[in-house]
Image: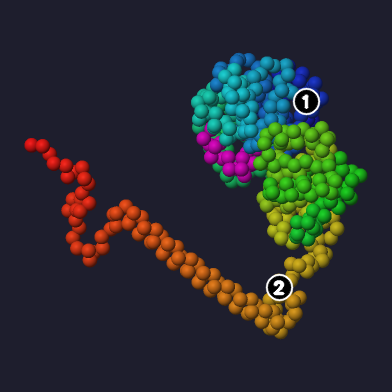
Amino acid sequence: MGTPTFAELGLSTKVLDAVTSAGYETPTPIQAGAIPHALAGKDVLGIAQTGTGKTAAFVLPMISRIEKGRARARMPRTLILEPTRELAAQVEENFIKYGKNHRLNIALLIGGVSFDEQDRKLERGADVLIATPGRLLDHFERGKLLLTGVDILVIDEADRMLDMGFIPDIERICKLIPFTRQTLFFSATMPPEITKLTEQFLQAPVRVEVARPSTTAANVTQRIVKSKGKAWDKRETLRNLIRAEEAELKNAIIFCNRKVDVSELFRSLIKHEFDAGALHGDMDQRARMATLEGFRAGKLKLLVASDVAARGLDIPDVSHVFNFDVPIHAEDYVHRIGRTGRAGRSGKAFTIVTRSDQKYLDAIEKLTGQDIEWLDGDLTSLSTDAEDEAPARGRGRSGSKTRGGKTRDAKEAKETREKAEKAADKSERTEKSERKDNIREANAARADNADRKRGQRKPDKEDGDAPLGFGEDMPDFMKIAIRA
């Protein structure tokens, strides 16, 4: 049996017209497997690697199912949860594209945007609510949102939600939505925590798995590139790679593990006159969207990014991916290189590896079930970094030489330095002690002067009994005789 067409999946006429206008004829495997069950109202568990078209696998049947009916104020009819702002914005774009023949009210609840503007959209009534978990709960706690009218719930990129710590929020949101809802659940991998979540919130789901979890696309050429461990060595290795691939490089995403490395690498590339932009979680929403739009439009050739951009970004024609850092979590490797080779195109992925990255590389090869080819010899062919080896040479046996001369000379210099430091410490402690004594004496003198001025010096114990009443200091007005 051949691959079905979109017309054979059961989609409505209006949706089919929008799909045709978008230039699509044949559904991807995840779309062909998930759409009929979603249209039938069943819960769906979709497992597919990134770039396989799973966004349309839930957008198309949702539009078909909500063609009739209208949403009430603050009570959305459907809810889609996404881990990042970029993914949420892309899902909104898909609804606009495929819902062009419908009059759907779409509300996007993400951080970095005014609450007031989002409140106005909720007040008009949302047929489709797309949100990140944190901002959704913010609106709910402010009393601006009711989830009792949600008929369809979509949890997208569930394993990414797990990585970002959103699972407690997801559990809370699911309890606020009617038990009778339909749930569409999508994930690229199925770690035990995600499996437990599906057992908790899905009712007899239809499992649609189009690729073995954590497999990489066959049309992506993968290579490992050795490098010394210093940051400037890695940056030089990356620049040489980019120049070597210049003939085939249309655009590229460069991934770093940390936000601070994104900024440093971005500045370095600009300094060396590369056309680059940066994308990470600390940027405000307007800057992030502007950078993404510039990259999509071809105004930027290189996009340096943290893993916030590793999943779901709909940039269909990325020619190269460079992993400046080997991802700590092996699953992230799959998602990173999935940014290239999309929609049947070919792509290239290069990963820069140092000696300290070996365990992460081993985890990636174990997860993907394949040995990744080295570009130009493995780590054993890497020359030893003398700078890294120097401390080990300095810890040699007595009588061995170091770069500073003989061990005995170094020992004498060390002893002299330690004596000088001890003398300086002793002198400093003496000065501090003297300063404290002087301060105490000055404070005591000031207190005595103040007491004398007020005529209220506190009696010492040997002064005898305390005076009665005012003592000898009775004020004159109390000595005036009273007329009988």
Tell me if 2 is positioned left or right of 89 in this view: right
Main SS, magenta residues: helix
Label 2, secondary structure: give it. Answer: helix
Magenta residues?
154-174
Query: Which quarter of the rendered picture does the N terminus lie within?
Result: top right
**In the rendered image, is residue 123 in sight?**
yes
> Which amino acid, by three-letter code, is at mark 1?
Thr
Q: Is residue 403 above or below residue 478?
A: below
> What's the distance in space between the residues labelled 2 and 1, CA to CA?
66 Å
- Asked if residue 167 is among those painted magenta in the image, a careful observer would answer yes
Residue 222 percent location from the top left of the image: 81, 49
**Where is mark 1, residue-wise?**
5
* Quadrant of residue 100 within the rendered picture: top right
The image's colour scheme reads: rainbow
**Where is mark 2, residue-wise?**
392
Q: Earlier in the sequence, mark 2 or mark 1?
A: 1
| Residue in view at x 89 percent, y 46 percent | 246
